[in-house]
Image (spheres, grey):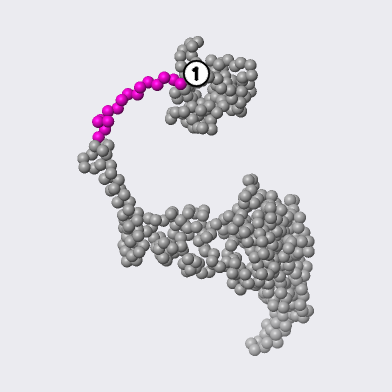
Amino acid sequence: MYVLIRRLGTGSGPTRTFKDEELAVDKLSIGRGTDQELLLPGDRVAYQHAEISLAAGQFRIRALASSGITVNGRSCKMAVLNSGDQILIADYRLIVLPSSEGIDLALSLEVLDQQDAPSVDPARFTTRLDVLQNWRPRRWAWLLFTVLLLGGLLLPALVAMKPDWQNTFRSTPLPDDSFWLSGPLHSMHSTIGKDCQACHATPFEPVKNEACMDCHADTAVHVPEVHADTSMFEGERCASCHHEHNGEQRMVFDDQRFCSDCHGNLEQRMSDAPAVERATDFHGDHPNFRLSLLQWQPQSQSWLQSPRQAVDASLQESSHLTFDHATHLDPQGIKSDDGDWQVLNCGDCHQMTVGGVNMAPINMDQHCASCHALSFDLQDPQRVVPHGKPDQVLASLREYYAAQFVQNRADGGNIPASRPGDLNSVTELQREGLVWVENKSTAVAEDLFERRACATCHEVERSAEGPAQWLVKPVRLNEEWFASSEFPHGRHTQSECIDCHAADQSTQAEDILMPDIAICQDCHKGQQASEGLRSGCISCHSYHQFDVHAEATP
């Protein structure tokens, strides 16, 4: 808009002088700042005092300073301007003039006459330093300088240099060397208290790594100590990343440039081909996820954690478990052993551990038994076999059916009486009972292991025929998918499980349900991003890595 400013000079009436100034502006800013379109010098005028804008065919003035403006004698923060309106800003008066051709807004500006302020008699004030007897301002300045020198420099220096004085001064209100601290200790170091020598072994020298390692001896290094390129880290100080006395948020250096300086060109820094790929930003330059899986070793009958592997269609989990996620997550529900239909969700079985990082193990009695009861006798549905090793199951069945045999024969009254010392009838009964109990137990065990209960969830093999023996392959679910990073489930409770894990579409236990990096990148942007969740390297990775580069770890 085009604005005409008419600055009124001396005189009055038709003889009053003036000077016109034309401005082409989007908004007319008013204040004593040098960047304002209409500059009004004076201490009572704010740097940005007000602005006039054109909106919907109307000129509006809006106060930007707390002192406000006065329009037509009324103090306000905003007003619509019409021809003839008067605006008072400190010692200045603006009047809206009728606009002429080519001019959108015309304003006259004049400086108001100042009245003499009432005089003040300095003799009425007796608190001025220059009227106090024998204490001129220079003496007060030297006294204050001496106090500051003693309390801020000399006493703390003596405490720092004299170990015998340290405990004495630190236990008194007098200034000690903690007076020099740039800020309070981090909460993790609060137990140190005023023992500055715990970290600052030598006054006025940077904290050495040895002082940190006295307490943090178990802290893992970034790469294994046997690595060929450990020389890259020589000379690095713990305090380069961990800034004490700078508040709770600065104890860990979180700028991802510290990581990308090396991980952006590892092939040039390392003597051998790097085991990790280039990464400088999670959203813009980060490799796909690689997973570490549990692998069963038949020879040693144990599990080993594999090295990280790229995710593709051929990658499968081998937990010896037979499980169908899609069936258990059917929206219509799943039928339990007692005939009731129950609608399940992920949280019925998968629950976070304390701290919200990992998921707690699945437990048969807690999570499965309500639907998969290990009952074996229709006449006694409350009796179940233990969820344990095959020999324990067989022992439980033999015990149950031995009691059933004795009870049935006793109720039938078919046990003949015998004289003391005559064992023929008892021996015959024992032989009959042993055969019946063994046959019954074996038949029921075969039904449990191979058809009805165990085979529903486990991989079962018949290892011998007589006496019958079964082998149930041990089940262990993978708990550490990412060997060099962590995923805090507790921070993602606002998302549904199936948003990241496609469990409702999985029909076999071998499916890898870990999300692809693209799913995480929908929310997590790089550290320099202007939108989304800003995520740096340490959001998922720890600098202090344990040895994750071994071929396999138990």
Extent of the magenta region: 111-126
Residue at the spot 64% in from the left edge and 51% down from the top edge = 526
Amino acid type shown at disc 1? Leu
Residue at the spot 37% in from the left edge and 20% down from the top edge = 115
Is 19 drawn above or below residue 442 in the view shown? above
Is 407 drawn above or below residue 161 in the view shown? below
Is 474 drawn above or below residue 175 in the view shown? below
Q: Which residue is mark 1?
A: 8
Placement of the N terminus among the 4 image quadrants = top right
Front one among 477 and 322: 477
Residue at the spot 40% in from the left edge and 21% down from the top edge = 114
Q: Is residue 438 left or right of residue 212?
A: right
| Spot occupied by residue 361 in the image (x, y as percentages of width and height) | 63, 63
Is 82 drawn above or below residue 310 in the view shown? above
Placement of the C terminus among the 4 image quadrants = bottom right
Q: Quadrant of residue 409?
A: bottom right
116 is within the stretch colored magenta = yes
What kind of secondary structure does the magenta stretch mostly adopt? loop
Circle 1 residues within 10 Å: few <14, some 14–19, many ≥20? some
Q: Is residue 177 left or right of residue 77?
A: left
Q: Is residue 151 visible?
A: yes
Q: Is residue 393 visible?
A: no
